[in-house]
Amino acid sequence: MAKIYEIYGTDAHSMTLSLLRAAHVSKQIPEGASIALKPNLVLSGTPETGATTHPGVLSGCIEYLQEAGFTDISVIESSWIGDRTEKAMKVCGYDKVCAQYGVPFYDLKKDRTRTVATPMRNMEITCRALDADFLIDLPVLKGHCQTAMTCALKNLKGCLPDAEKRRFHADGLMEPIAALGAVLKPSLVIVDSICGDLNFEEGGNPIQTNRMLLGTDPVQIDAYGCRLMGLQIDDVPYIRIAERWGAGSTEIGADDIITLNAPTDGMGYPPASGLVKKLTKSVRADRACSACYAALVRALYLAQKEGISVPNEIFIGQGWRGKTMSGLGIGKCCTGASDCVKGCPPSPDAILDRF
Ligand code: SF4
């Protein structure tokens, strides 16, 4: 079974260096390999919001790899539908890290793609992700309004063109995420769990948990992420599907967690709040894109905070295209609703205005 290295602290750069050195990662990388670092830059938000990978994780990785003699290093990512990767990389400080170390950043929204057979169906995947000799997955451990949690496997979705991301949602997310993990199989995963938002993928309510992880099996890492967040593995269906399709193993043996330092007080994960479930009682979602659903959940959250009542029936998702519904529709897929917030995706403010 693979090992997971765990470290506590708040300095992402030095924690990353310590993890890589402890795991002797340079010995696992073939000489002259092209190495692609895939962080989570889902949107234009700083790591302190609990949404994006800390630039210190990136700088720690690059410094370690360059010291070990590797020169073909790049950073690859595409933000979610509705945000610009280039803006997100600047907001997050990646432009400075890349300039400091002389490493290129590639916006995968502009990359070429290839059709790849997966255990589920053919998929369009970006060439830079497919062609890296050694793909390093750098997710944030955080909550997600549709999949309960997101970490190693789901972070790979940023290796897709936007059209394929939309198709993932049309296919219900779980099987496509698992299938992508089975074909992309990152060689290494380093998890930023310093201050993820445990409810919302897009951040806003960060929880300081001051921890980072390193492993080689994305399925095992996700299973451990569930344990940390107080979730059952079955609460996140794509994990077991990915295991079935050969992406890794959910097994975590007693000796598989190697802790590099002692935790201090206040670094635990609070119990799962069930907040998203409560907020979305009146929502009828059918194959909604992440950015759209997240905007709706954010609007519902703000409405609850401000004491604004919400419609009894809210429709969202690609599955409502061409149908007639009585209630509030969210986005261009739901123009058949009796009232509709236009956009693709609409903003949380635009949705809130219609409550
Ligand atoms: S309206 Fe929303 S669900 Fe429909 S395609 Fe646009 S982002 Fe996706």
Image (cartoon, rainbow, N blue to C red):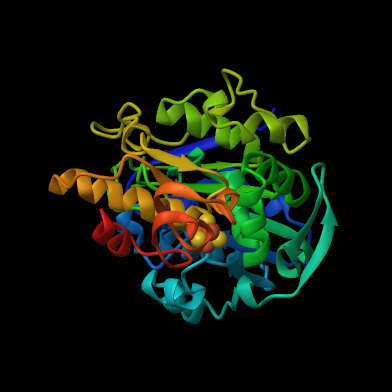
Residue 140: x %, y % from top left? 46, 49
- Position of residue 214 in the picture relative to residue 136 (left or right): left
> Farthest left residue?
307
Residue 119: x %, y % from top left? 82, 42
69 up-or-down from 54: above or below: below
> Farthest top residue?
254
Q: Residue at x 55, y 66 (%)?
A: 62
- Position of residue 277 in the picture relative to residue 305 (left or right): right
Q: Is residue 276 visible?
A: yes
Query: In this orientation, which residue lies closer to the viewer: 276 or 49?
Result: 276
246 up-or-down from 204: above or below: above
Query: In this orientation, which residue lies closer to the viewer: 37 or 33?
Result: 37
Residue 201: x %, y % from top left? 42, 50
Residue 320: x %, y % from top left? 56, 50
Q: Residue at x 78, y 65 (%)?
A: 131
Query: In this orientation, which residue lies closer to the viewer: 220 or 272?
Result: 272
Q: Residue at x 70, y 27 (%)?
A: 1
68 up-or-down from 193: above or below: below
